Image: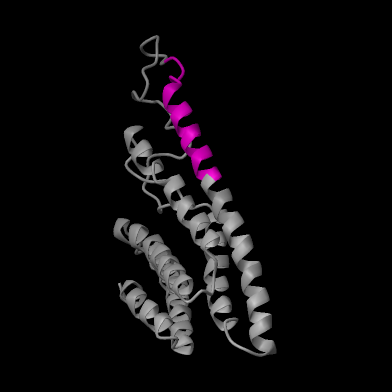
Amino acid sequence: MARLVGVPLFLWLVLIEADGWAIAVLVAAGLSDWLDGKLARVLNQMSRLGTVLDPAADRLYILATLIGLTIRDVIPLWLVVALVAREFAILPIAPIVRRLGYSGTLPVHFIGKAATLCLLYAFPMLLLGDHDGAAATAAKVTGWSFAIWGTALYWWAAVLYWTQTRQLALAGRVPPGPDPGSGRGEPGGPGADPPAGGRKGAETPR
């Protein structure tokens, strides 16, 4: 919740060009994201709400950064379009998975986590690169490296999520093997193996 509250604060700091404080908020958000995830696993305190809010906070920070840096002409419009289009590309996945009868959502893929991490590294660097001096130039080059890799991985993750969705759809249409007791099997009946991916709740795709 603290990370979510930090989103409008971060955007305001970016817009008034208080870049040092804006980066401090972004770093604090990133560290708290890592810490709350680690504590949740160690203490076994994971929840459905947490699995929804955690990636939502990441997306909101990325969106706030895109808005702020676009208004300040730090990043071009094509980067914004590429990242926003990716979000629209995976939007139909959740209702499709629910229609297939699964209560949870697709598990977060490592590629998706890596993409988010790259972008969260890229934006502070690009913010620092919007100044003068050798350090700013180095930050700008590093920031664009992370931004390009992050965008590519972001789209790669989208392809993987659609591949998982297709596999779930195909698995749902294949009837299980015959039931020795009844002579024939029924899809979803007792003893049937769940399709790959299971029905357990998981994190929202990043």
Dominant secondary-structure state across the stretch colored magenta: helix
Q: Quadrant of the N terminus?
A: bottom left
- Is 104 on the left-hand or right-hand side of 113? left
Residue closest to the eye, 193 or 68: 68
Residue at figure coordinates x 42%, y 32% from the top left: 194
Specify whether residue 2 is painted magenta. no
Please, which residue is most extreme toward the top here?
A: 183
Residue at figure coordinates x 58%, y 49% from the top left: 156
What number of labels is visible?
Answer: 0
- Is 49 on the left-hand or right-hand side of 136? left
Specify the quadrant of the image occupied by residue 125: bottom right
x and y percent of residue 21 in the render?
44, 88
x and y percent of residue 155 in the render?
55, 51
Q: In this rendering, is residue 93 above or below 131?
A: above
Specify whether residue 163 is painted magenta. yes
Residue closest to the eye, 77 or 56: 77
Q: In this rendering, is residue 205 above or below 25?
A: above
Q: In this rendering, is residue 82 above or below 123?
A: above
x and y percent of residue 117 in the render?
54, 66
- Is 102 on the left-hand or right-hand side of 65? left
Residue at figure coordinates x 36%, y 58% from the top left: 51
Q: In this rendering, is residue 132 above or below 189?
A: below
x and y percent of residue 46 in the render?
35, 61
Residue closest to the eye, 143 or 5: 143
Q: What's drawn in magenta, residue-wise?
A: 159-178
Specify the quadrant of the image occupied by residue 35: bottom left
Specify the quadrant of the image occupied by residue 52: bottom left
